[in-house]
Image (cartoon, rainbow, N blue to C red):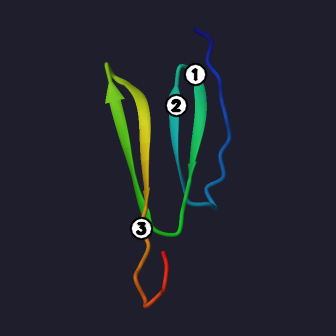
Amino acid sequence: MSESVVEISLLESAAYVVKRGKLTKLTAKEHGEDVIVWKNGEVLDVDRSQRTRVEGQEVI
């Protein structure tokens, strides 16, 4: 397999997944959680949840 080099910015908050030589950027969000699901040593899925703080809103 040939080697690839990719540059990423260290000035932004993000997480990166490399799968089969391809880079996927997980962007930051206001509040929440990302769970990486592994299968047979590879990333299978990313489960993203969003958290909303209750501050007296009528509807969320």
Question: In whole angstroms, how far apart are the C-alphas of marks 2 and 3?
Answer: 26 Å
Q: Amino acid at mark 3?
A: Arg
| Residue 25, image x, y percentages | 59, 44
* Earlier sequence position, callout 3 versus callout 1: 1
In the picture of the structure, the residue carrying the numbered disc 3 is 51
57 to the left or right of 41: right
Pointer 1 local density, CA inside 10 Å: few below 14, some 14–19, many at least 20: few
Residue 16, relative to residue 59: is it above or below? above
In the picture of the structure, the residue carrying the numbered disc 2 is 18
Specify the farthest residue to the front: 58
Q: Give me the disc on residue 21.
A: 1
Q: Residue at point 41% right, 79% down?
A: 53
Quadrant housing residue 7 = top right
In this view, the residue in front, 21 or 30, is 30
Q: Amino acid at mark 1?
A: Gly
| Residue 10, image x, y percentages | 61, 56
Confirm or deny contact between disc 1 and disc 2 (CB under 8 A). yes
Q: Secondary structure at mark 1?
A: loop
Q: Secondary structure at mark 2?
A: strand
Pointer 3 local density, CA inside 10 Å: few below 14, some 14–19, many at least 20: few
